[in-house]
Image (cartoon, grey):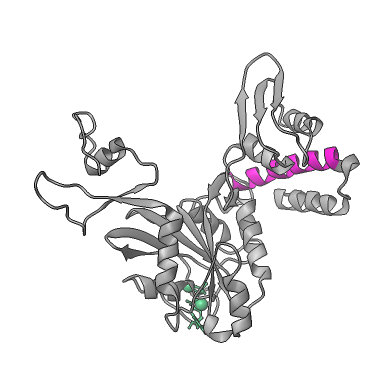
Amino acid sequence: MGIVEKIKEIEEEMARTQKNKATEYHLGTLKAKLAKYRAQLLEPAAKSGGGGTGFDVQKSGDARVALIGFPSVGKSTLLSKCTNTQSETAAYEFTTLTAIPGVIDYQGARIQLLDLPGIVEGASQGRGRGRQVVATAKTADLILIMMDATKSDEHRRLLEYELDAVGIRLNKEKPDVVFKRKTTGGITLNVTVRLTKTDEKTIRSILQSYKIHNCDVMIREDITTDEFIDVLIGTRKYMPCLYVYNKIDAISMEQLNKLARTEHSVVISCEMGLNLDYLIDRIWAELGLVKVYTKKRGVQPDLNDPICLRKGATVEGVCNGIHRSLATNFRYALVW
Ligand SMILES: Nc1nc2c(ncn2[C@@H]2O[C@H](COP(=O)(O)OP(=O)(O)OP(=O)(O)O)[C@@H](O)[C@H]2O)c(=O)[nH]1
Ligand SMILES: [K+]
Ligand SMILES: [Mg+2]
């Protein structure tokens, strides 16, 4: 039996199993198994073929934003409208077959926008170019999940599932859990809060199924079993995401109102050029970049030429942004 079939079997068993106190332990073990198989599936050398590497596009600019969505939702139209790059657009599905980078110029900052092929259900298991698409998404600083506002919102759940399957956690913080492997001493489990969604027995059984017999675990948050497995696997990526609903020119005001009010969402029409500036403002805000200007003594700074850094950046980071030898010879900075 191949990995994909094994995964399917476990998922079916999980669906059959009622969720209650008595089955919590059993479900926990199934989840641990599932996570292991999924990890295998993503190994570049996985026998099922495909490989876990993304498209080979050079990162450039101050941040990378990836466009993920079903075919023909308007990803390429957005790229062509917001950047100087033209990506082929058409009414038929799978027009785009590779990654096409463009640059959004935002008040001197350069944001790389990546147009990607459309993905379909089963993408994470290698359908279409899905695996390559989601692997590329992992290299971004922000994900835009693009939706066709005229189509079912069910697509959103399917896309979330595909990203989740490759270890991308959207709009979530890393769980507050410290996990340290040791060579001896057994398992020390410290829980500083009351666990309502999992329990110590389940946690221990998961450690056992991963053959971890010596470690320190400190849990400081009311986590779920899944979140604990995420910590163990350690390769999870916690990424910000905006849900972009396109083609609002073709829906009613009532529908528009509803979509615009959902969390992390932006409504646009690429074709009519509606709300695109607002989308770029939101992208900027989600990326949490800060602009730093350098200035010579007695001269005004050049406000068209910022150095862009992540929020929380240090003076050392600024130095490294200018030249790699600057920090070593650095003496002091005046910061406004
Ligand atoms: N009504 C309407 N149609 C749009 C809008 N934006 C794009 N379209 C149309 O949607 C179709 C698909 O657009 P594309 O940009 O090729 O979509 P895509 O997501 O890149 O598609 P694939 O590359 O095939 O995955 C085209 O016929 C566009 O003209 C919009 O805002 N409103
Ligand atoms: K298309
Ligand atoms: Mg396209």
In the rendered image, the residue lying farthest to the top is 185
Q: Position of residue 24 (x, y in %)?
A: 84, 41
Q: Is residue 44 or residue 67 the one in the foreground? A: 67
Residue lying at 29% horizontally and 35% vertically, measured from the top left: 316
Residue depicted at 74% across the width and 50% down the height: 7
Percent position (x, y) of residue 99?
Answer: 44, 63
In this rendering, would 121 be left or right of 291?
A: right
Lateral position of residue 53 relative to residue 262, left or right: left
Q: Where 72 falls versus 26 (above or below)?
A: below
In the image, residue 43 lies in the stretch drawn in magenta:
yes
| Observer able to see residue 114 | no
* Vertical arrangement, residue 20 with respect to residue 283, above or below: above
Q: Position of residue 129 (x, y in %)?
A: 55, 62
Which image quadrant is residue 73 in? bottom right
Q: Image height check: is 299 above or below 335?
A: below
Q: Which residues are magenta?
A: 24-44
Residue 19 visible in the current orientation: yes
Left or right? Give the position of 281 relative to 132: left
The quadrant of the rendering that contains the C terminus is top left
* Residue 278 image point, x, y percent: 43, 70
Q: Between residues 296 and 87, which one lies in front from this camera angle? A: 296
